[in-house]
Each structure stands twice: as C-alpha cells, then as structure tokens.
Amino acid sequence: MDRFWWGVATSAFQVEGFVENDMTVWERRGKFNNDGKYPLYQNGSAHWLNWRADFELLKQLNVNAYRFSMEWARIEPQFGTFDGQALDQYEQMVDRLLELNIEPFLTLHHFTHPVWFHEKTPWTSEQAQDVFCRFTEVILKRFADRISYWITFNEPLVWVLAAYGDGKFPPGKSDVKLVMRALVNILKAHQRAYSLIKSYRPQAKIGMAKHFINFEAHRKWFAADRSLADLLHHFFNKMIPEAFETNRLQFHFPLLFDVDEAINLKNRIDFWGVNYYYRMFVAFRLNIRRPFQFIFKDESGLGLTDMGWEVYPDGLSKVLRYMGKFNKDIIITENGIATLDESLRMRFIDAHLEQVLKARENGLPVKGYFYWSFLDNYEWLEGKNKRFGLVHVDYENDFRRTVKQSARHYARIIQIDLNNRKGSLS
Ligand code: FCB
C-alpha cells in the first residue's frame, strides 16, 4: 500500500521574516498595494525565530509532510557569498522535521530572489540558470543526504507574468517577449537542476508546483468568450506540462506572441505539484488595450473567499483528471482558503478532499495533499489580512500563535486516515 502525504505548506519569505530580498526592496520603494489594515511585510510571521515552537504545532496537526522553501537571499546575500549560519539553521530545521517524522518537501524557488539578482543575472538572461544551479548545488551539498522530495520552482508561469507581464513583482517589467524569455530560462534551469539533484541523490523525487485555474466563459452563449477560455486553458494549464511531453515549449497567442522553443524536458519530472484555488470566468472585450476581463462569481453557490475567489471544488477534479494524462505522480502542493470563517474553511477542506478521494478511487495517482497554509502569513500583493492559515498569527501581539478550529478538524481527518491505512485515502 503506498503512502499518502498529508501536509501543510508555506514559503520561506511569506513566513520567516528578518531578511532582505528583492521583495523587501520592492516594498520599500512603495510598489505593493496594501489596504493599510495591517503593516506590510514586517517580518512575515516571524517563523525564523519561532520555528521550533511552530514545528511542535506541526506535530499537533498530525501531518506526515511539510512543504517549505529556503530563502535564497538569506543563503546567498551577496553574489557568490554563501552564509553558513543561515544554512546551519536550515539544517537544524530539517533535522528536527525528520526527528518528528515529518517528511520535508523542499521548494527551491518560491517567487523571491537575492537583492542583487535582477540587476546581475535576471531570468531573462541565461546566467540566471547558472546562478540558480549554483544555489541548488550549495543546498544539495548540505541536504541531499536527507531530503527526498524536491520542488524546483513554484508556479513559474505565475511568477513570470507578475514580474514581466503586468510588472507587479520585481523587476516590474511589462513586455510579453520578456515573459517568454524568462520562462524558457526557468524551464531550462529546472531541467539542469533535475539532473543535478539526481546526481547527488538518485532516488530523489523531483517536481514542480504548477498553478491551475479553471477558465470558463462568462457568457456561455458567446463564442468569443468560449474561445478565450480555451486559449487561456491552453496557455496557463497545458503549455508547460505538454512541453514535458514534447520537448517543445509551444504557444501561439493571436497578436500577442508566438513561442516555439526546444527544451529537453521529457521525463525530467517525477511528480506534478498541483496548486489549485479557483475557477475564473473570462470575457472578451473590444478593447485593444485590455481585451480580456476576468471575473469571479459565486456560480457554485459555495461562496467567495476573502481573496474574492470562488470556492469551486469540482475544479480540482477537473485538474486532476487532466493531469492524469501525463502518467506522473500528482501531489496537491497547495490548496486553501483565505477566510475568517472557520466553518467555511472546514467545508472548503472537506469538499476538496472529497475530490481527492474520488480521483484516487478513479485510479489517478494522487499521492499527497498540502493545505495552504500552515500559518497565517504575508500574502504578496495583499499584505497580511488574507488569512489562509490553519494557525492564527496575532501580528499585533508578538506574533502569538493560536491553533484554529479548522486545524483540529484537519488533524482529525489525518489521524483517522493514518490510523486506518486501509480506509478512505490509503
Ligand atoms: C499561490 C502561491 C502562494 C500563496 C497562495 C495563496 O499562488 O504559490 O505563495 O500566495 O497562492
């Protein structure tokens, strides 16, 4: 009977605090929107100081896996200079997870970079691949003997679109050619990192966490909306997984761009990480500057989250079914909800787990589920008032932690399943 990974996820920057990177510089330059309710980054959830106590909370959640990342800016604050003390702390963290019998799932790149990165070796240049691989190798030298699960990149397409498409993330450019150039370098870096990790740890399982969106026509009767939904599905959901089948990153977007780039990706992935949150309705507009409109509406009747996203669990089944075609293991590396309503969070978890169960009953190789997020944290463009956590963080009182009702609920589900491996999800 194979194992099911029950986990929670975070990313270094969103929770750790006490670091200087491209995002903190960006924030200081006033580039992030924030509704002013909470201070901006202000040390995330101070996990860098509280990790020991946080890991005890992980234990209370009954998880057997934890997805997290290591902050590149902390490890390589100056170009080519690596900080041994930062690595020491990460080593203590990984060792503690292993002692607690919690499998570490390490993400190497989760949106953030050292301060020097965009000036010196931006993703639009091939040197980015080299510096990323050098960073990966530093990590491998310390951790290859104890980390089995590696996620090279988190949501590369989301990141390139934010950094080079609408310019919301540093380096804040807006040019479709750069979007694709950066993506190609990231995929090549993945390919190289894949071989590198295997050379240090042949039995490692290596994946990428990919964001999936259910696109649907806003006006079902309108062919233009339907074609747009198809086009976006192709671009956003299919283009990257297909490149791993065909060794070509290929996409033609009328009037916008044409890409056809050979990249040796075939079989250079062991599992697909699925990050799934919502369905999005799309409408075509006769407006040359903004031809698409993106709409969230509560068509399923299950509610909208504090992000304004529709709760749409059926979308997870659709994604899992689609990804089943690729004959690789699938791990849900993120799924979660920003809300203050604990009963809604519990319903969200139950409804999505039901889809996971169905997918497994239908023979799909879904091997794990990670709730996003372990802790309330800093949500990029939104600041700190979007609470995805199973554990509440009181930003005004010393970052005090309180386990939420949904955390106990999730812990119970996990316990039942782990106690009864012949039961539901085993
Ligand atoms: C995903 C990101 C993650 C978090 C969630 C809400 O796109 O990977 O860091 O912000 O959204």
Image (cartoon, helix red, strand yellow):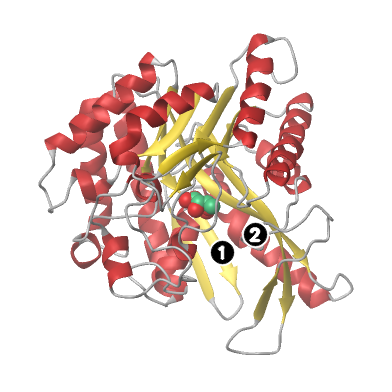
Amino acid on which the number 1 mark rests in the picture: Phe
Q: Secondary structure at mark 2?
A: helix
301 is higher (above) or lower (below) than 366: below
Q: How many marks?
A: 2
Amino acid on which the number 2 mark rests in the picture: His
Q: Nearer the viewer, residue 205 or 96?
A: 96
Q: Is residue 172 left or right of residue 376?
A: left
Residue 100 appears anywhere in the view: yes
Q: Where residue 108 sits: x, y (%)?
A: 35, 41
Q: Which residue is mark 1?
A: 251
Residue at 37 percent of width and 51 percent of height: 44
Residue at 32 percent of width and 65 percent of height: 124
Q: Which mark is residue 369?
A: none
* Quarter of the rendering occupied by the C terminus: top right
Q: Nearer the viewer, residue 137 or 386?
A: 386
Q: Where residue 407 sits: x, y (%)?
A: 60, 33
Q: Which mark is residue 234?
A: 2
Residue 214 appears anywhere in the view: no
